[in-house]
Amino acid sequence: MQPALEALPLSIRCARDYAAHARSRLDAQAWDYFDDHAGSGLTRRANRRAWDRVSLVPRVLRAVAHVDTRMQLLGRNQPSPLLVAPMALQRLAHPDGELGSALAAASQGAGFVASMQSSVPLQQIAAAVRNDEGRGPLWFQLCLLQDRAATLAIVRQAEAAGYEALVLTVDATIRAPRPLVLPQGVQPVHLPAGAAFHPAPGWDDVAWLQSASSLPVLLKGVLHPADAAQCARMGLAGLVVSNHGGRVLDGAVATAQALPRIVEAAGGRLPVLVDGGIAQGTDVAKALALGARAVLLGRPVIHGLAAAGAAGAAHVLRLIRDQLRLAMAQCGAAELAELTPELLFPAFP
């Protein structure tokens, strides 16, 4: 891994420009890990193309002098609808790892979702940002282990550290093996030695987690409307429309395509979030117009982190936020609630 840039590249005009800088600084194994996709990469490409297929339809003479990106999520006010998605082993990208991306998120008023397979202790991440009044939500992503006691031990650590919600990932229990030799000093610090992930979790496991923790639980990896309806019936705090960035099932539906049906099935009973291929502020505007409450950003943040540490990750988030503000102004939307399907062509991806 090459040293991170001492200053932000002058050539950067959008978040996607960071990818080339990140690739030049990561060794081949680290780049392949973060850039990985299932099969031929069909779903990963579909994620991006689905956002591109939808166009924004600007409005004129709307007298929008200022735009407001503030919103409320799980009862908490936050400055923007942006969150950093849970991503494992971020010290492969930069020595600061998850600590760098968490600080970047807090500096830009974005939320942060720490991964269960973080390479930095969850307590250290939380301690660095939880008292920042300008930060967004601080959540912890969880995968179920075969041993419920081991799962619960990690949940208790997250509760004690000050995390505000649990994000249960349910779409990656079965996947192709990914060979990865971790460099010295980089490891998933919270996984017990010999721990095995639950190979076939069910809705009863979700109910168990709800009863076992005082934290609100969101489900990540929902693509089918029937599953969204079940989330609502169970009283979950929210769901994330996600196909794991195209890393699990090649040929899975793109998240932008799935989003409208999920929103309809949820029926306003719980907030719907989305990730997958979102790389610019106009994508965020489209997602919100399709009914998402907020979005999660993955690879673009890692690219910024790899290229320039926390400053690079923060720059990515600022670029996307500023693009969102510009898109809102051009579409005549003074606040996020005014981003509606009428501003899209076609109305669905």
Image: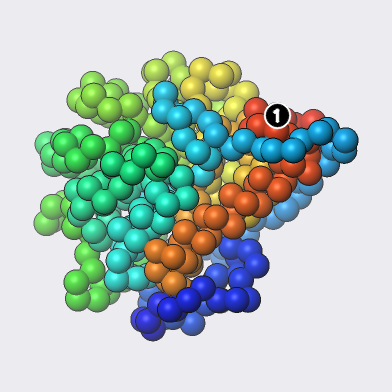
> In the shown orientation, is residue 108 left or right of residue 17?
left
> In the shown orientation, is residue 201 left or right of residue 26?
left
Residue 330: give x, y in percent of width and height: 78, 44
Residue 261 in sight in this render: no
For mark 1, does the 10 Å Cα neighbourhood hold few (<14), some (14 to 19), or many (20 or more) residues? some
Q: Which residue is mark 1?
A: 338
Q: Secondary structure at mark 1?
A: helix
**Rendered image quadrant of residue 335:** top right
Asked whether 220 or 15 is in front, the reply is 15
Q: Residue at x 87, y 38 (%)?
A: 60
Amino acid under disc 1: Glu
Residue 270: give x, y in percent of width and height: 49, 22
Q: Residue at x 40, y 68 (%)?
A: 309
Q: Quadrant of the N terminus?
A: bottom left
218 lies above or below 265: below
Asked whether 181 or 216 is in front, the reply is 216
**Rendered image quadrant of residue 349:** top right
Q: Extreme front residue here?
A: 65
**Rendered image quadrant of residue 268:** top right
> In the shown orientation, is residue 25 left or right of residue 18?
left
Q: Residue at x 44, y 16 (%)?
A: 233
Asked whether 102 or 148 is in front, the reply is 102
Q: Report the label total.
A: 1
73 lies above or below 194: above
Residue 8: give x, y in percent of width and height: 51, 73
Residue 95: give x, y in percent of width and height: 29, 71
Q: Residue at x 59, y 34 (%)?
A: 292
